[in-house]
Every structure is written in C-alpha cells, then in structure tokens.
Image: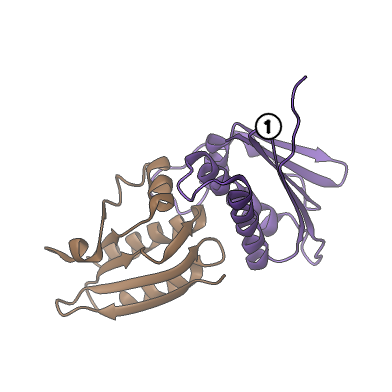
Chain colours: A purple, B brown
Amino acid sequence: MASHSKPFEFNATLSHLDEGLDTLHESIKQLRKSTGRGEDDRNLMHFEIALAEIGANVLTHGRPAGTDPPVEYRLWVEDDTAHALFVDGGPPVDEVLSRAMPDATSEEGRGLPMARWLLDELLYKRDGEVNRWRLVKRL
Amino acid sequence: MSLEVQSRQIDNGVTVVAPTGRLDVAGAPALKDAIGEAVKNGKPRVVIDLEGVSFVDSTGLGSVISALKQIRSSQGDLRLAAPNQQVRVVLELTTLDRVFPYYATVEEALTGF
C-alpha cells in the first residue's frame, strides 16, 4: 500500500506584497527545517524561485484595482514532492503558460518562463471568479 | 524585508553599491535609486556587491539590467561581485551570466577596473 504521509503543511492568507513575500520565504524556511534540507538543496531552491515569481505576480496583479481581497496560499510536501496553491480574486490571466523567455536586454517578462522551467508542473485555471495556481516540484 | 542599499566611493573612482536583503519586486526600486545617484557623477564605474543579497527574483534581475543600460549610456561600466548560489542559479538560468560576468569578491571586481 502506497504511503501518503504529509510531513509538512503551511497555510496563510497574503494581503500585502512585501509581507506576502516574507511569508512565502518563511514558509520555505520552515519546510527546509521540517524536512532537514539545506540552503544548497538545488530542487528546493528552484521551487523557492518559482514560488516567489508566481507569488509576486499574484500579489501584484491578482487583486482587482480598488479592492484588497487576500490571496489564499497553501504549501505542502507529500511523497517527496512540494506543492503550492495560490487562489486570487484578480482578473483572468491570458496566455500565461506560453510566454517565452525575453531577450537579454529586456528588464521584465522572465518570471513566468522561469517558473515554468523550474517546476515539474505549473497549472493555471480560471475557476469562476478566481484564479488558481498550482506549483509542483519533486524534491 | 525591505532592501537596504549602501554606496561608497573607492579611491580609484569606482562606486561600490551594496544592497542587503532580498533583491525582488519589493526591493528593486531601492537599487534603482542608488544606481541613479551613482550615474550622476560623469562616467560611472560601478560594482554591485551582492554579498548581502539573500535572494533575487526576475524583477530584481531587471533592476540590474536597467542599471547596466543606464551606466553604459553614460559611457560607464558595471561589474557584479560576490553573488550567492541562488543568485548565480538565476543568472545562469536566464543566460544573463553571459551579459554580467561576475567576480567572486569585490576586491577581484575592482582589479583592473
């Protein structure tokens, strides 16, 4: 029978960019501590980079102008795989998974291509009035 | 965690800009401000000392590209020093390590600059 242990779980609501990013990095710090992984664990480092990119995107664009609904964030590890979920009330995001890496002189547009490259799965779904982002990385 | 940036002028006229904290979407404006100050004085030669940067994201990286453009448009030059492993991974992943050759220490970056 397969084991489905869930050794780590973290839940938060994120309301502001700076504090929200603090919370994301803190959740990874707690994951490192909980699973005994070091700062130089390459897969977890890749996951943290992708998490920060999607998190920054959600916290910047995921809330309609003039409103301030919190973003739901959940992080968990199951069967040596890190999962994160963001749910935001922002407008739909178009063509999010097909954006290419821009050229070297561009000052923006690398976040989503980087996240896609670093993760095993990056899923985006418009679900009624909310956006759901799912990040998966085998550790 | 906001980014703090300190700048100092070295004897040979090079400005060392030393951010501390996360160079991300929240911290990038502070680096842009510091670079803006550094390019005021003629032909700028700038070393960004990354030793105190714990984490960089794509927006932070964008602020470094912006710095390079700003400095080169003033006929100056930019070098990066002491990036940690995470910063090196992001530079390599985006192939910007070809645009920004980085140095292990500030001292190495200052040599022959």
Farthest-out residue, top: A1
Above or below, B51 against B57 in this view is below
Which image quarter holds the N terminus of chain B? Answer: bottom right
Above or below, B112 against A89 in this view is below
Which image quarter holds the C terminus of chain B? Answer: bottom left
Q: Position of residue A115 (x, y in %)?
A: 56, 41
Residue visible at 74% across and 35% down? Answer: A5
Q: Secondary structure at mark 1?
A: loop
How many numbered marks does the figure carry? 1
Q: Determine crowd level at label 1: few under 14, some 14-19, many 20+ residues with C-alpha closer than 10 A.
A: few
Q: Nearer the viewer, residue B83 or B26?
A: B83
Residue visible at 37% across and 41% down? Answer: B95
Q: Position of residue B4 (x, y in %)?
A: 46, 75
**Three-letter amino acid code at disc 1?**
Asp
For this view, does B80 lie left or right of residue A60?
left
Q: Which residue is mark 1?
A: A79
Residue visible at 40% across and 67% down? Answer: B52
Q: Position of residue A80 (x, y in %)?
A: 63, 34
Residue visible at 32% across and 76% down? Answer: B38
Q: Chain of mark 1?
A: A
- Taking the image as drawn, is residue B93 in sight? yes
Above or below, A58 against B110 in this view is above
